[in-house]
Every structure is written in C-alpha cells, then in structure tokens.
Image: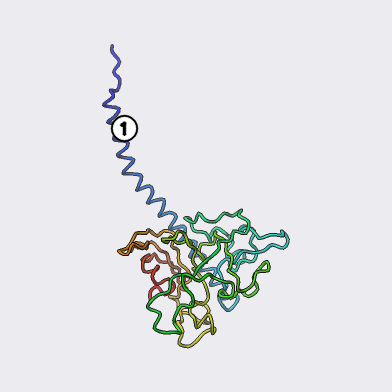
C-alpha cells in the first residue's frame, strides 16, 4: 500500500489558514491584555483615593504629594530607591503596596533605581478658558519646571533648596506622568494642592476655584489625579501631536470615583476637566 503524505499545496493552505486565524485573534488577545492592565490601574487608583481619605481624616488636610519626592536615606548615605522609601505620604502607613503608585504601562521607573529623579517635571498646559478670571488662572504653564516650593515642600531632602526643581521617582505614576509631545517625552505634574495663581501665591481666596485640594472642603468632583498612560495620539490639522478624542484617560475624583474620560478633553482641561 502506498503511504499518502501532504502535498506542498495542502501545507501552504494550512499555513495560510493559521496565519489568518493568528491575524484575527492577535488583536483580540492584545485588547484583553490592555483591558486587564486598565482594570488594574483603576483598582490601584481607587486604593489611592481611599488612602487619601484616611490621610485627610488623620491629618485634617491633604498631602503635598501622593507618594513623595526622592528621599535621602541618611542611614544609607545616598538617595533611596523607590522600594526603600520610608516617608511616603500615603505609602506604608495608609497604602502598603508600592506597586499601587505605578501604572501597568509605566516603563520609566525601576524599583532598584538609585534616586530615580525624573527631572525636569513640568506643569501641564494652561486652559485658555481660565484666562478671564485672574483668581481662577493656572499659576504655571508647560514651560515651567515644578519646584519644591510650588508643591509646598519647604524643607526638601538632601540639601536641596525650596526653589530647586523637585526630584521625583519615575515610578510614581500619579504625581507625575510622561506625555508624548512633538519634542519627545515630557514629564508633567498630575497632583498638587493648588493649581491657580491665587492658591499658589496668596494661599487662597473666596473667588478662587474651589476644586483644589489645598482648600478646607473641596467638592467631591475635585480631580485628585489622572492616568494618561493609555492615550492614543494623532496629528491635528496644524500637524501638532494631540491625543485622540476617545475615552482612555482615567480620572480619580475626590469622592472616590474613578472614571474613564475623553483623552482630548482631559488633555485640554487637566485639573479643570468637567467644568
């Protein structure tokens, strides 16, 4: 009896079918993977919100940062790695897992990185609609480097001055975040007590925007921080790189809600989103 083997054409047909199935299934698997990372980030943001509420109850106000600037360890004689941080505002005392402060898509920080300063860190874009009211105007813009003084950290670690650029851990995904621009990757501020000129310079005013954590009783829709790691970008009509108008940014509100919002709106409005 003659043994029948696969012909070359049959093998090519099988390979073509496998390739087609792989092309169909790969995007599905990728979407499932991204969705799992998004859900993990949303859960961690919820944990940060709960820890922030505990801090408010204990301290009577909100912290200058969620994690902290780069800590100097006197016992080690050097800057601390992120997994060696002891003086985090929410970490350890109210949130035990350091990984809660890192987005699943953040590739810029390593736990064993000494110091890990992501410098410089800039303020986000100013919202053009806020220019009408001087009290309600954002104090600094995208060309301004964030200093310790602006964060209300007046005694920085390791001999830094209050007027020096603040040094952050790149791991820290909710105090700062990398953003794509035409000039490359830029780190932007995501959390602070005061965004406006009145809050920064005068410590507050009755006519200032109440949606700022520096005030005694900010409303529940005050934005704590936002996650922009899942953004997709495109070029607009002026050939500027901007986020696509789709819901990929996650916003943590003071009332504890974490919602997925339109990336372009969050990009344009940042801490004013929803107003």
**Location of the N terminus (image quadrant):** top left
Q: Residues within 10 Å of mark 1 (few under 14, many from 20)?
A: few
Q: Is residue 78 left or right of residue 254?
A: right
The mark total stands at 1
Q: On the image, which quarter does residue 51 sit in?
A: bottom right
Q: On the image, which quarter does residue 77 sit in?
A: bottom right
Residue carrying label 1? 15
Q: Secondary structure at mark 1?
A: helix
Give the percent coordinates (x, y) of residue 40.
Answer: 46, 57
**Location of the C terminus (image quadrant):** bottom left
Residue found farthest to the top: 1
Give the percent coordinates (x, y) of residue 58.
Answer: 60, 75
| Residue in view at x 52 percent, y 68 percent | 50
Give the percent coordinates (x, y) of residue 183.
Answer: 44, 60
Q: Give 179 or 15, whichever is nearer the viewer.
A: 179
Is 187 above or below relative to 152? above
Give the percent coordinates (x, y) of residue 105.
Answer: 47, 55
Q: On the image, which quarter does residue 166 sit in?
A: bottom right
């Amino acid at each position: 009896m003659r043994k029948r083997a696969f012909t070359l054409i049959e093998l090519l047909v099988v390979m073509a079918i496998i390739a087609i199935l792989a092309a169909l299934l790969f995007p599905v698997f990728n979407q499932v993977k991204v969705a799992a990372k998004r859900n993990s980030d949303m859960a961690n943001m919820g944990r940060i919100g709960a820890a922030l509420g505990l801090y408010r109850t204990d301290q009577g106000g909100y912290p200058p940062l969620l994690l902290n600037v780069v800590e100097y360890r006197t016992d080690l004689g050097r800057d601390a790695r992120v997994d060696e941080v002891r003086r985090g505002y929410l970490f350890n005392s109210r949130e035990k897992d350091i990984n809660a402060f890192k987005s699943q898509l953040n590739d810029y920080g390593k736990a064993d990185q000494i110091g890990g300063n992501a410098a410089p860190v800039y303020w986000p874009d100013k919202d053009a609609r806020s220019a009408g009211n001087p009290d309600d105007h954002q104090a600094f813009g995208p060309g301004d480097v964030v200093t310790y003084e602006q964060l209300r950290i007046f005694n920085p670690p390791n001999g830094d001055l209050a007027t020096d650029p603040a040094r952050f851990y790149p791991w820290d995904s909710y105090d700062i975040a990398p953003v794509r621009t035409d000039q490359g990757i830029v780190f932007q501020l995501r959390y602070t007590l005061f965004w406006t000129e009145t809050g920064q310079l005068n410590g507050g005013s009755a006519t200032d925007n109440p949606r700022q954590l520096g005030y005694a009783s900010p409303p529940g829709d005050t934005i704590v921080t936002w996650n922009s790691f899942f953004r997709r970008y495109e070029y607009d009509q002026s050939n500027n790189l901007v986020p696509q108008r789709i819901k990929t940014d996650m916003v943590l509100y003071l009332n504890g809600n974490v919602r997925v919002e339109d990336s372009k709106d969050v990009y344009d409005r940042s801490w004013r989103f929803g107003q």
